[in-house]
Structure formats: C-alpha cells, structure tokens
Amino acid sequence: MNINNFMIGLERKHPGEQEYLQAVREVLESIEDVYNENPQFESAGILERIVEPDRILTFKVPWLDDEGNTHVNLGYRIQFNNSLGPYKGGLRFHPSVTLSILKFLGFEQIFKNSLTTLPMGGGKGGSDFDPKGKSNSEIMRFCQSFMLELWSIIGPETDVPAGDIGVGGREIGYLFGMYKKLAKEHTGVLTGKGRNWGGSLIRPEATGFGNVYFAKEMLATKEESFKGKIVSVSGFGNVAWGAVQKVNDLGGKVVTLSGPDGYVYDPKGVSGEKIDYMLELRTTNDDIVAPYAERFPNVEFHAGKRPWEVKVDIAMPCATQNELDGKDAQTLIDNGCFCVSEGANMPSTPEAIEIFHKNKILFAPGKAANAGGVTTSGLEMSQNSLKLSWARKEVDDRLHMIMQEIHHSCVEYGKTGDGFVDYVKGANVAGFLKVANSMLDQGVI
C-alpha cells in the first residue's frame, strides 16, 4: 500500500472533503504495516471497500415555523460499514453539518464501535438544521419531517441512530414518536431514549465518563491518578458534563469550560452546584458559556479564546473537531500538561498530535477515549432486546470494564520498543483488524 498514491486517488473522487480525508489518512498511516503484512487484505480490496460508505441517503427536510413560514434543510444518513452488526452512529443537527463532516464521523465510528467489542457497525447522519432559538413545536415538526425520510432504512437490526450535537433527549423523543407511528412498532430503533420508554441510565453522561475512565487507565501506566490533578475541559455539553462529574469523583479539579464565545477559568473548580448549572446553560439553547462567569464569583471569562492556554496537568477536549491545533498543543506542553484524552471526535489536528507524540506524553484519540457514549448506546440496545432495564451501577460497571478493555487493546497494538504507547496506532490497528477480518469472512459484497 502506498498511502500517498491511495490518498491522491481518494481526493480525486471526493474533492474538498477535508475532514473525511483527514480521518482516512490518519487510519491509513497507523495500519500501513499490518496491512502490508497481510496480503489477503489487498487481494480482497479491503482498503478500497472500507473507506467508501455502503450507501448515503440525502434528502430535503421541509418544515413550518410557528408563523407558518416554510423552511427547507438538508438531511443525511450515511450507512458506512455493517460487517460487525447494525449500522450505529449519531444524528447531528447543526449548521456546520456537511457531507464531509458526516463521512469523517461515520468512518471514525466503524473503528470506535469495533473497539467496544459490541456487535455494532458504523454510520452517521444529521442535518444542517439549527435547533438554537427554535421553539419546541418547531423542533418537533422538523424531527417529524426528518423521520418521514429516514424511517424506511433504519431498524433495530438494520441501523440504530443515536444523538449527537444538537440532538438530545427531546429530539430523540420526537424522532422516535414519528418512527413508531410510521413503522407501527415499539422497538429499540434509536438510542438515547427517555428512561420511561426504553432508555438506559447514565447514557447522557456516558461519553464523558468513558473518557475519564480511559484517561484513568493511561495514568495508571505511569503510576499516576486524577487525585489532586488540575484538568482543563472544553465544551459544556453532555460530554463535558459527564467528564466533569467523573473527574470530581476521582479527586481531580476541572478549571475550564468553553463555548463558541470563549472559555471560563474557574480556579476553585467546577463542582457541586456548578455542575448542575451546566445543565441550565444547555437548556437555554444560547450555546454560550459566558453566563457561567456572571453566575459564580472569581470566575474569569476569556472571549474568543480556547482553554488550552491555562496551566493544567490533564487536558480533555470535549467540544468539536479540530479545536486543538499545533500552537495549542505546544502551549499545553510548555505549561506542563502530560496527558490529553479526547472526549470529542477528532478534536486535535494532525499537527497537535505530532507534537504530543514528539514529547511522549499520554495521548488518547477520540475513537478510543470517546467510545463510552456508543458503548452505553450498545448496552441500551442489549437492554431493549432483552426487554430489561439494568440498574445504574450495572450499566456504569459494564461501561468501566469495556473502557478498560479498549485501553488494553490500544496498549497491545500501540506499544513501541522503548515502552511508549502510541494510542492512535493502537486504536486504529485494533479496530481495523476486527473489521477487516470480518469483511474477509463475509466475502466481497
């Protein structure tokens, strides 16, 4: 395999899809050796097949606002690879949604889901619809219109969407209600459902919990822990909320949160009622973090800036893709940060990752450290299939155990001769081998 030649061909087929191409290149660079050591992969065209989605559904979503005006958004569902199980991946409602972003997310999801050890394939979807500033009635009408196109290609054994940015419990409820009416069945076709009608405990917190659990395992390899550590977290949504809770549980102190408007620095730490206030911030739909500094004393708000300039021991980017660049990475290193664990999908740029690796710090890529959310979605699917509901502790224990197993796989495939663990390579190789071997077993389809 010649990576550059392969990427030239892929870029020619998919011009301008930078996020998708970035994600593919990262995986190819990690798996190059193992791919070349297994000629059966090349003869079966595994690479050419795995980088292309099985299918992409694109559709218009017309909806009426409260004044009776008609609006039209674009909707997407990308079914990427189902060699391990039903397509599984979230729906994102945000103005930034493009085909490239959803293809990058769906491609990442293949390997993330593989790492969980649960039977789930990879997929993604969403719309450029912006829930911000919309009434509940407008969001309901949009979700119902969206599901009118989506329902015929999803199902509990076919494709199981979940939430993502802009799609929380409210949106999942509206989507599920319409699916149930159209399909005439009450099944586990969506995850992130309400607790009263098939949802799982700790699902909203799960991605943040899983990120901290993974970082905990990394720290243990250096005989370190969260106890007494200063932590920087970006974002203030579900992932950040879960991460802040679990860092506090393990004795650490989170001193930053961020939004599109900037970041807040809280030297006393985000804990107690401040964690509860994160939920209030989200429900406003304003997508800004500045009110946190107005609500609590001795908190600084830094408009238009990112939290990576603050001196911390551990950094957890939990907001969005490419939010931490090479300059940010160097600042973290210069300030003594020795562990970075990604809570979002691909939040660090290639330049940032190169700097982390050059300085041999602990660095966990999103497809491993961010897997807690889809893991708990998979556990929700299991509960739905069994017609059971597990207690909070049982779900949390299962999540913790799976994150430990993911860490073990990353170490197994990522450990180098000098003892350094390249978690990016470990995650990519471990995830790829399971999918590639399954594709071999199932033939060229």
Image (tube, rainbow, N blue to C red):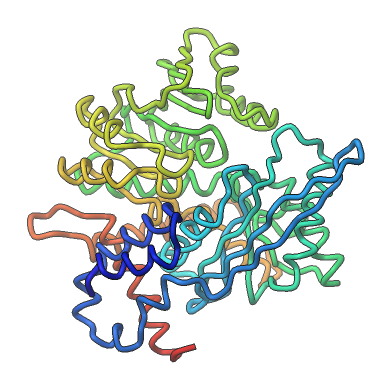
Instruction: Tell me: residue 43, above or below residue 270.
Output: below
- Farthest-out residue, top: 298
Image quadrant of residue 342? top left
7 on left or right of 178: left
**Quadrant assignment for the N terminus:** bottom left
Instruction: Tell me: residue 14, above or below residue 18.
Output: below
Residue 190 drawn at (x, y percent): 68, 62
The residue at the point 38 percent across, 87 percent down is: 440
421 on left or right of 294: left
The residue at the point 66 percent across, 27 percent down is: 286
Instruction: Tell me: residue 173, above or below residue 341.
Output: below
Image quadrant of residue 30? bottom left
Identify which residue, 417 or 425, lies in the foreground: 425
Q: Is residue 10 visible?
A: yes
The residue at the point 69 percent across, 35 percent down is: 132
Residue 223 drawn at (x, y percent): 20, 43
The residue at the point 24 percent across, 60 percent down is: 411
Q: Is residue 202 visible?
A: no
Identify which residue, 27 or 289, lies in the foreground: 27
Residue 171 drawn at (x, y percent): 73, 48
Residue 177 drawn at (x, y percent): 82, 58
Image quadrant of residue 284? top right
